Image: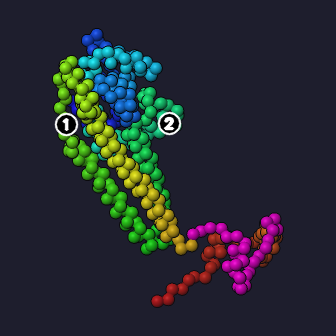
Amino acid sequence: MKKKYHEALYDYIKTGGQGLVVSVKKGYVLRFRLPLLEDVLRSDDYAHYEVQKSSFLLARTLQSIGGFDVPKEECFEVLKHFMSCPRFTSRVMRYYWCCIRESQSFASFFEAFCYSQKSRVLWEEWKQSSRFGISFTAQNFPLTDLQKSWISYNEAEDQKAKMEEEWGRAFFIGSAMNPKGVQKAQRDWEARKKKEDEYRSRLLEEAQKGDLSEEKKEAIKADKSVEDLQGEYWDWIEGKEDDHDKAVKEYKDQVMKHIEERKGFISRQSQEAREMAMRVQEMNSLSMSSPIRAYTDEEVAKMTQGRERSTINFDEGQEYSEHLSKRYFKSQQVPGGKMPSLQEQIANRPLPKLER
């Protein structure tokens, strides 16, 4: 049963891409990861013959045998083993390419996955793991291009969330000081947010319907005979493309296509974050005609040049002493030595007159 797109992409980001699982007659299970673009390019550098290139790719991506991890140092020994049994290698390789194509079919759902709550929860888990130095994935190979794109997207999404908070604070201040000036900016902001939310919701709905743009290809189950292998060798001599070459070409085309799509998506996300920051700055500028700041003595002198100034210079200790003197020692004397209470002062105050 084919996984749903969000399940497949969730597993891919967590593991780096689990590929083909092969059970052999002796009961061992071989687990292969999905190849990186570097793996495919190096297989072309290693050899020209199909079986050799396939053996190289399988040896590079083999992760475990019977539950035991395959050390990177044993890669060459594994390569020699695959080359010693070309029929087995060719058969496994056919299913391996089918597994790769299936994984590529989910790459078109990358943007929809980034908009899902599942992705944001996974991102919080990623950040907490990084914060406490805990390994987020168990993969022993570099981050894939898709993982890097996912990280870039979520970092930009965090920036946008921060801009949303700053916008709320700026709007609160601006609406109190310049309500008319911020109304248009608020309408534009809300319209942009509504349009983006509608787009994301529509994209998620379409993604839930399944694969809409790519057709699922059938797996090739036929084994190759010795004559077929010999024919492939002479095809290589004559410069004809074999099945591996065609599969590699298709793989490269798909990888480059998805890389360009993700680049455009991440670039758009970063641009939106920058635009939000600019809008917040505009809102802050509308909050008040003259932003509050401290003026230096030179600036105050320049601003008040040619005008009379009533400047009172005081010493902090002297001011406090004068306050005590006026309040307690030089206060107004009342006949009888008794000050009227506050309640008496309120009762004796003149009543206000209202004129119609």
User: Which residues lie in the magenta part?
Assistant: 291-318
Q: Secondary structure at mark 1?
A: loop
* Residue at screen point 27% across, 29% down: 237
Residue that badge 1 annotates: 216
* Residue at screen point 37% across, 66% down: 187
Q: Position of residue 72 (x, y in %)?
A: 44, 22
Q: Is residue 277 visible?
A: yes
Q: Is residue 265 above or below residue 178?
A: above
Name the one closer to the observer, 257 or 195. 257
Q: Which residue is outermost to the bottom?
A: 356
* Quadrant (top left, top right, bottom left, bottom right) of the N terminus: top left
User: Is 321 a magenta residue?
Assistant: no
- Residue 84 figure quarter: top left
Q: Is residue 79 above or below residue 201?
A: above
Residue that badge 2 annotates: 130
Q: Position of residue 229 (x, y in %)?
A: 23, 22
Compared across the picture, whether 197 is left or right of 186 comes to: left
Name the one closer to the observer, 82 or 163. 82
Compared across the picture, whether 32 is left or right of 172 comes to: left
Q: Are marks 2 and 1 in contact (CB under 8 Å)?
A: no
Q: Position of residue 328 (x, y in %)?
A: 79, 69
Q: Three-letter amino acid code at disc 1?
A: Lys
- Residue 36 figure quarter: top left
* Residue at screen point 75% across, 77% down: 311
* Residue at screen point 31% across, 59% down: 195
Identify the colour scheme used: rainbow
- Residue 273 figure quarter: bottom left
Name the one closer to the observer, 301 or 221. 221
User: Is 313 a magenta residue?
Assistant: yes
Q: Secondary structure at mark 2?
A: helix
Q: Three-letter amino acid code at disc 2?
A: Ser
